[in-house]
Image (tube, coloured by chain):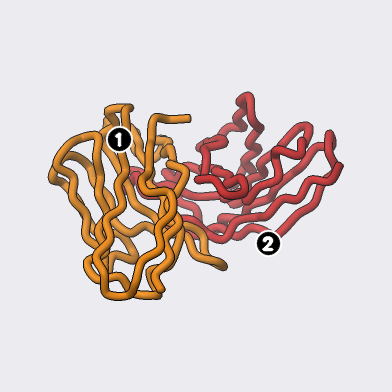
Amino acid sequence: DAGITQSPRHKVTETGTPVTLRCHQTENHRYMYWYRQDPGHGLRLIHYSYGVKDTDKGEVSDGYSVSRSKTEDFLLTLESATSSQTSVYFCAISEGEPRARLAKNIQYFGAGTRLSVL
Amino acid sequence: DAKTTQPNSMESNEEEPVHLPCNHSTISGTDYIHWYRQLPSQGPEYVIHGLTSNVNNRMASLAIAEDRKSSTLILHRATLRDAAVYYCILKSVPNTDKLIFGTGTRLQVFP
């Protein structure tokens, strides 16, 4: 497995509470991603990062924020969790460079975090 | 982004070959075809990718139609461990490293 650790692996929380999920990598890959997966859907991109302090929104970013202060860590924060954010969250990494080869780039995924918001 | 169409589910017996189809009729000339799979309770994993020519690796083969409007992932001898959801994804140059997942094909493998 690629050196990707997601924590926690499982979390149950209450509506309105803040939640932070952590993705830690040991591969020194530049690009990192957060996805969510819900029944009936494939994975959907929440936010991504192309480097330290370089982040951008994906297709389902509302209600989520991210931070990347170090290459190895990418944090996903739910400022005020809602029941609609109950999901399985996956982190992914990729080497990312050079840009001309991005379409060939392979992403490696973590094992996921199962989040339940009651 | 160009879209892909895959059957919702397929079945196979163990040790038989499996051909997983993917249609991508709006593919552009610079789109790469990627396949990922997701085993139960795991994150997706990369399987194979190609542009125009057929590709082989230790996991599978990828056959790409001459007009590139379709492709087929071939598992030469299915095992129980190959039971997974298989995703066919197009990636564009130079736009993105992003993966846009559809709902994929759920492959069942029977002993």
Letter of the chain in red: B
For disc 1, the marked residue is A96
Q: Which of B66 and B95 is in front in this view?
A: B95
The amino acid type of the residue labelled 1 equals Gly
For disc 2, the marked residue is B8
Say left or right for B83 vs B27: right
Quarter of the rendering containing residue B104: bottom right
Letter of the chain in orange: A
Q: Which of B23 and A39 is in front in this view?
A: A39
- Secondary structure beneath dot 1 equals loop
- Secondary structure beneath dot 2 equals loop
Quarter of the rendering containing residue B93: top left
Question: In this rendering, do the residues under marks 1 and 2 share a single chain?
Answer: no
Locate residue A106, reporting x and y percent. Answer: 43, 36
CA gap, disc 1 and disc 2:
31 Å
Locate residue B87, reporting x and y percent. Answer: 57, 50
